[in-house]
Image (spheres, rainbow, N blue to C red):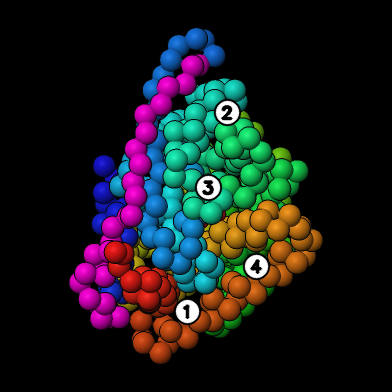
Amino acid sequence: MSGQRVLNMAREQLATAASILNIDEGLHQVLAHPVRQVIVNFPVVHDNGEVAVYEGYRVQHNLSRGPTKGGIRFHPDVDVEETTALSMWMTWKCAVVNIPYGGAKGAVKVNTKQLSRREIEKLARRYATSINMIIGERSDIPAPDIGTNAEVMGWIMDTLSMQHGYTVPGVVTGKPIELGGSEGRVEATGRGVVVSAIEACRATGIDFEGAKIAVQGFGNVGSVAARLSEQHGAKVVAVSDATGGIYNENGLPVNELYQKFSGVEGGIRNYKECDEISNEDLLEVKCEVLMPSAIQEQITEKNAKKIKAKLVVEGANGPTTPEADRILGDKGVMIVPDILANAGGVVTSYFEWVQDLQNFFWEEDQVNDRLAKIMQRSFASVHDMAVKHKVDMRTAAMLIAVQRVAEATTMRGIFP
Ligand code: GLU
């Protein structure tokens, strides 16, 4: 199972940080394990009347800095180990940008492409009910991830509210605006990726305007990152989605691609003024900035040597393996790690939650400005740490995050 590999990868990253920080073995073990893993099996009646049983998970990694926070993934390849790794990364992500949450993640093993909208709704509602004893606006707040979106979050909010007997908007973020969602939340992860890329370009002497960018993944993260990069004057030369990739060294009209082909049968491959490439080829095209924004374990020891980008900005969670980290590091490639680069989503989720708890909603400009400030400040602190300790950006981000979580855990003390 690839989940175990991903969990090993997350634990290896923690071990590196724990050893530099001289964290004692007991505390290291606390941080290496999730506080709660719930596995559920639940039935859904399909449109044809047949019953199918689905397996789902909700994992909470660490509660020291506040309620746990993290998305829900609907994907056929998930397992409890992968969900655990993703929950750990959420803990570090919230800590590195200093928002008051611990990390969590949820998932259901399902291929939603084979389900009708009504079946997906029933699955979401039943999954939410199966984990309702551990989620809540003060305890654990889900959000969208791969395979889920605002509509699914709306159903989950409604399901939990029906069970409470009153509306509880703060129980989930990434909701439709009409149901207490925040302006700017849908674009927030991609926006944060681009803010990070601009900061990283500045730090490494690359001019973002005119820089060639390749984006793997054209979902909620990649499509926004590509479009905002274009708006900031960069040249997006390659993009890919589940159908494969496209490349044009003179640049692709990403906004047009998004308007015309997103969600359309055949995807971006419907566009013809380009070369067709595979998702693997995309990672190796000639560009200054590579944004892997699809899924984990894409840059590995097999292809790391062939990567031509000077900067890798991780829109996805866990796209680069520790072996690839070392190879790219030796080549002088800067990697802006996932826990920093894609934190924009959870930062704006935090804004949404605060707005829901206060029943007081902000303008889109306020949301985007506050997001940009947090991303810039976090980038600067990670970069300073990297320079000070002569470590790469991932280790630097982990040092800041692990230190914050370790301090909170120690200050609270071990109960009883
Ligand atoms: N699923 C997103 C992530 O991996 C967002 C999580 C959230 O907003 O809670 O960061």
Residue 351 lies in quadrant: bottom right
Q: Please report the residue visible at 33 percent of the width from the left and 71 percent of the height from the top.
A: 413
Q: Is mark 2 within 8 Å of ligand 1?
A: no
> In the picture shown, does residue 73 fall above or below 22?
above
Q: Which residue is mark 2?
A: 121
Contact between labelled residues 3 and 2, with CB atoms less than 8 Å apart = no
Q: Which residue is mark 3?
A: 136
Q: Secondary structure at mark 1?
A: helix
Left or right of residue 61: residue 70 = right
Task: Give the mark, 1 or 4, whose residue is nearer the N terminus.
Answer: 4
Task: Give the mark, 2 or 3, whose residue is nearer the N terminus.
Answer: 2
Q: Position of residue 147 (x, y in %)?
A: 52, 39
As for residue 300 lying within the magenta part, the answer is no
Task: Give the mark, 3 or 4, whose residue is nearer the N terminus.
Answer: 3
Q: Secondary structure at mark 2?
A: helix
Mark in the foreground, 3 or 4: 3
Name the kind of residue labelled 3 in the image.
Gly
Q: Is mark 4 within 8 Å of ligand 1?
A: no
Q: Answer few, some or many: residues within 10 Å of disc 2's Cα (few below 14, many 20 plus, some between 14 and 19).
A: some
Contact between labelled residues 4 and 1, with CB atoms less than 8 Å apart = no
Q: Nearer the viewer, residue 263 or 341?
A: 341
Q: Which residue is mark 1?
A: 382
Q: Position of residue 194 (x, y in %)?
A: 61, 66
Q: Which residue is mark 4?
A: 371
Name the kind of residue labelled 2 in the image.
Glu
Number of the label disc, if any, that sits on residue 103 = none
Marks 1 and 4, how far apart at CA? 16 Å
Marks 1 and 2, how far apart at CA? 40 Å
Q: Which residues make up the magenta segment?
A: 19-46
Q: Secondary structure at mark 3?
A: loop
Marks 4 and 2, how far apart at CA? 31 Å
